[in-house]
Amino acid sequence: MLEFTLSAKHAKNLVKALENISEDAVFQFDSTGLHISVCDTFRNRLLESSLSADSFETYTCDSSLDLGIIVSRLRDVTKTLRAKESVSGSYSLDDPNFLIFNANGVTRRLRLVNTDLLKSPPPIVYEDYIYQATVESKRLQDFLKAASNFHTVEVAVNSSLVSFSSQEGEDEVSIRFTPDEVNLNLELTDALSTHGIIDLAKGLSTINDLVLIRGGPTIPISFSWSWGAGTSSTCYISRWE
């Protein structure tokens, strides 16, 4: 048996993050909360999101459940929610093909997808990060908007700054975070990597408050953030080859 009540804020942020990565996802519920891992078709973006049991307004799950969900069907539920509203959900083995949602007096039976037909990527664990920096999401969002018409973004890190820059011909957009603005931990002299602007913009659609950036010479760059207590998201963006 699964029963929960989730705020509109958490529900909307979760759906927005997922729909920019994949059309479907395996929602893994257990006693600790909800865990989701998805990647896009080309595996350029991989997103891991978690909502702890405490982040729900109410939460009961007496067994581990893997539920296959089409994200657009879930968005049909959340798009009617206003800021201070909530959505409740329930699942029972007595009706194993549906997840039931209630919001604003409207009940929706959401048909589930066979999880055997979906591929949930394994958890990502990297040990060879050479730098990590914590930056403000607002400035990073402003940069992504300003660079939206470009194709690639270069991320440069050295002992004195973290910078994002994008250039097409003579046009250039850039942003720099100095040591006074970021918590920078660097193990090598410098690092430079190039990534697709579309991958960054879609992968970071729900970044909020402070964002932890980690990277290295041979691994994807990762961005970790939270949009509220008990929530966490990490998006891995592949290097541009």
Image (spheres, rainbow, N blue to C red):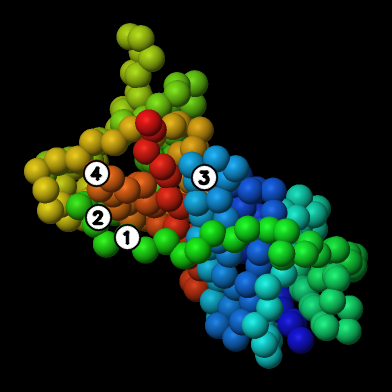
Q: For mark 4, what is the residue?
A: 217
Mark 1 vs mark 2, CA separation in Å: 7 Å
Mark 2: secondary structure: loop
Residue farthest toward the bottom in the current orientation of the protein: 62
Amino acid type, label 2: Tyr
Judged left or right of residue 176, residue 14 is right
Q: Do the residues labelled 2 and 4 touch (CB within 8 Å)?
A: no
Mark 4 vs mark 3, CA separation in Å: 18 Å
Q: For mark 2, what is the residue?
A: 129
Mark 2 crowd level (few <14, some 14–19, many ≥20, 10 Å Cα): some
Of 200 and 241, nearer the camera is 241
Mark 3 vs mark 2, CA separation in Å: 20 Å
Label ID, residue 43: 3
Amino acid type, label 3: Arg
Q: Do the residues labelled 1 and 4 touch (CB within 8 Å)?
A: no
Amino acid type, label 4: Pro
Mark 1 vs mark 4, CA separation in Å: 12 Å
Give whichever of discs 2 and 4 has the lower sequence position. Answer: 2
Q: For mark 1, what is the residue?
A: 126
Q: Are marks 4 and 3 in contact (CB under 8 Å)?
A: no
Amino acid type, label 1: Tyr
Mark 3: secondary structure: loop
Mark 1 crowd level (few <14, some 14–19, many ≥20, 10 Å Cα): few
Q: Are marks 1 and 3 in contact (CB under 8 Å)?
A: no
Q: Hey, which quadrant is residue 32 in on the image?
A: bottom right
Mark 1 vs mark 3, CA separation in Å: 16 Å
169 lies above or below 44: above
Q: Disc count in the image? A: 4
